[in-house]
Image: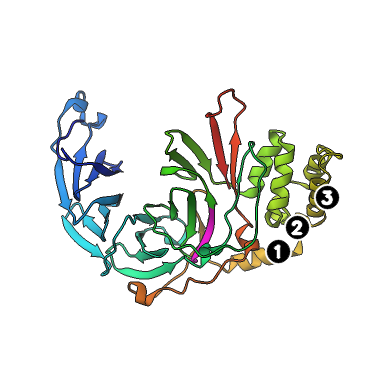
Amino acid sequence: IVSSEHRGQNITALCWDTSTLRVFVGDSVGKVSCLRAGSSKLGKGSAFVIFPVQTVTTVDSRVVQLGYQDGRLLVSSLSRCYLCDTEKEKFWRVGNKERDGEYGACFLPQNRGLLVGQPPLLYCARPGSRIWEANFNGEVLSTHQFKKLLACPPVPLITYRNEPNYNPAQSSPQSLGFPKLDQNLLTWTGSAIYIFTPQNGQVLLWTEVKDLVDIAVHRNELFCLHGSGHLSHLSLLSAERCVERLLRRESWTLAAAVCCMFQHTITTSRARKSIPIDRLEYLKSQLSSSAQTELINQLEEVILKLEPLDSASSSRRSSISSHESFNVLDCGIYRVISRRGSQSDEETSSLMNQSVSEEERLKEFSFVQEEDQVDHGKNFSCYIW
């Protein structure tokens, strides 16, 4: 496909409509166009048909991010967000206040559990670590404030190259501008990745990753482009699944370190299904009694805290969970469903400034990078959980 619609301008955003093989294109002067690729459904030779390029709209400034969902195109520019009905050619502004800078926006489909059939929500980044939540018509429902919640320390990236290092001390609040947002509210800066759960207004986790330029997300897989040109692959997994994987690969030291670091998850009865007590005892036996005494002692403390498979505390948690409304994302994250009244802009900010205790924040997730056993240093994959 060759198009001269944006000749002389920089392409700043791309977005696919996979249902009709259309791609939306945004550029540095705010023009948004749509072009269609050939499809085998159209018959032989259709790939060689030249489809006309359609100008969808021109917004007030450079396009930062595009999103498409169920016939509507979300355009985030340097100054505000716009919602476009591509079938009826209608346009709305999201919210009343402008902004100045690179702030992203995305759709969050409501396609699981009790929310099946409900229209998607919109999330639009604002200055000062704020994010608007809006309905499918562009009406702002609430404002999430994550500045104080980001005072928590980063979850460590666990890699074969370095020993995992975690400092639970609180850090300073972070006032960030989120240049792009993706489903499940993942965002990033040049030096860190952040994942939020807007339904209960929490920071799920954040971790430091160097030299980030862009991230593409597929389910629980993250593909990160770095300034040096290389790609890294990250996956969001549960802590117990990570330990199980490390045990299968006989990475004894790293598995023990993860068990100790995330013992709030490993000691629960739920984890006994994938990590029974005898496997942890075997793990302890594989550590060096002379060189890894401290790690062995820490692992012994974890083993002493292990809950049996059918513990009373597990029953209590199950009872509590049965009264909650939640659904499970593709990546396995449990998403709490909450209802809010109609609110607008920053003045009616939703009260999301409660902080997550460090124990709860580390209960489920950590970031892990694991190198494959290859000769070339650049061939590695990252497992995040």
Q: Is residue 368 placed above or below 46 in the rendered structure?
A: below
Please report whichever mark, 1 or 3, sits nearer to the chain's N-terminal start.
3
The residue identified by callout 1 is: 315
Cα–Cα span, label 1 and label 3: 29 Å
Q: Residue furthest right?
A: 290
In the rendering, at what x and y percent does residue 92 appear? 21, 62
Judge the density around disc 1: few (<14), some (14-19), many (≥20) Cα neighbours within 10 Å: few
Residue stretch in magenta:
200-206
Reading the chain from its start, which is encountered first: label 1 or label 2? 2
Q: Secondary structure at mark 2?
A: loop
Separation of marks 3 and 2 at Cα, in angstroms: 26 Å
Q: Nearer the viewer, residue 316 or 295?
A: 295
Q: In what element is the residue under mark 3? A: helix
Q: Does the rendering let one see residue 216?
A: no
Q: Position of residue 173 (x, y in %)?
A: 51, 65
Q: Residue at the location (50% across, 44% down)?
A: 210
Residue topped by disc 2: 310
Q: Which mark is residue 297?
A: 3
Instruction: Classify mark 2: residues with Cα within 10 Å, few (<14), some (14-19) or many (20+).
Output: few
In the displayed structure, 105 sits above or below 277; it is below
Q: Nearer the viewer, residue 45 or 129?
A: 129
